[in-house]
Image: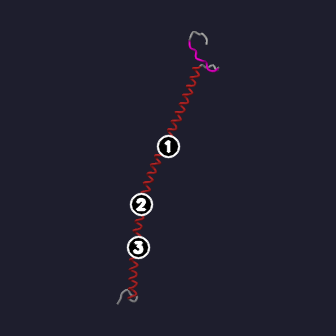
Amino acid sequence: MGSSGGSYQPPKAGGGGTTYAEQQTGVVEDSLRTQYQAEATANTVMAQMTTQRYQLQGARDNVADMRQTTEKAKKELADLASKAAKKRRRLQMIIAFLAATDTLLFFRLAYCGGSFFCR
């Protein structure tokens, strides 16, 4: 250390001709760049996560709608099956009535000798 009047002289970095202060300024600038890049990456990740959250919420809503639609279709199918069963029973009753009528008319024809009117 020289006797240059007692003023502080920061140490010189390497032999590249840059002062310690310039070197530290470069380190701080690199740190800031790294921080800004990390912040940009974090913002991108947050935006992607927000988009995915909305997609998941939309999917959940779609599933809920699908469940409601499925329940409604299930009830409608049950109603249709019930109506079909009622119609089938009604047709069976009509068939039974017509068969009984046909049988009675057959016996009347046989009893009256081939004529519908017995004399």
Does residue 56 lie above or below 100 as drawn?
above
* Residue at mark 2: 76
Q: Residue furthest front?
A: 1
Q: Which amino acid does label 2 sit on?
A: Glu
Closer-to-camera residue (38/117):
38
Residue displayed at 35% across by 88% down: 118
Magenta-colored span: 7-14
Q: Residue 52 carries which label?
A: 1
Q: Which amino acid does label 1 sit on?
A: Gln
Does residue 17 lie above or below 55 as drawn?
above
Earlier-in-chain disc, 2 versus 1: 1
User: Which secondary structure class fits the magenta region best?
Assistant: loop
- Residue 100 coordinates in the image, percent (x, y): 39, 79
Give the quadrant of the C terminus.
bottom left
- Marks 2/3: CA distance? 24 Å
- Residue 13 placement, left or right of 56: right
